[in-house]
Image: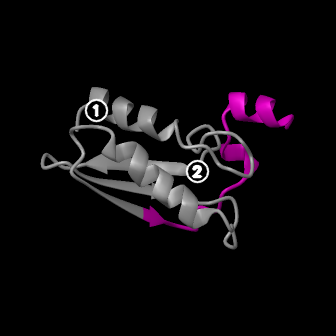
Amino acid sequence: MDQDMRDSLMGALEQVIDPELGVDIVNLGLVYDVDMSEEGFTVVTMTLTSMGCPMGPQIVNDVKHALYELPEVSEVDVKIVWQPAWSKDHMSRYAKMALGIR
């Protein structure tokens, strides 16, 4: 996968907003990796802010919906992982500013 395609995938994922925090999952640092095969099979490796996150299923559904908007994507698999554990250190400067975190 070339850098332009990776940028397109990450751009689509930036449209997915965490409903509890109101910031996109990329800037929150929830997306650890995204990969796509030549056939369009796309794998997103990500985490959630907590293991008991009640919005997890909705976020996963929103990830799939956002990626299926790209014509190159034929199938999406979202892998939720807990290692490394998410912390506010994963957040972008933008996300920290939006949430008032230093």
Residue at image mark 2: 30
Residue closest to the eye, 74 or 46: 74
User: Could you tell me the amino acid type at mark 1?
Assistant: Met
Query: What colour-coding does the image apply?
Result: one colour
User: Could you tell me the amino acid type at mark 2?
Assistant: Leu
Residue 78 picture location, percent across and down:
41, 61
Name the side, left or right, on which 26 lies relative to 70: right
> Which residue is found at the position 49% from the left and 59% from the top?
60
* Total numbered circles: 2
The tag on residue 81 is none
Name the side, left or right, on which 92 lies relative to 98: left
- Could you say whether the residue bearing mark 1 is in a helix, strand or loop? helix
Residue 14 picture location, percent across and down:
52, 36
Would you say residue 24 sits in the magenta stretch? no
- Which range of residues does the magenta coloring cover? 79-102
Viewer can see residue 96: yes
Q: Is residue 62 above or below residue 6?
A: below
Residue 95 picture location, percent across and down:
71, 34
The tag on residue 5 is 1
- Could you say whether the residue bearing mark 2 is in a helix, strand or loop? loop
Q: Residue furthest bottom?
A: 52
Q: Is residue 43 above or below residue 12?
A: below
Q: Is residue 28 above or below residue 44?
A: above
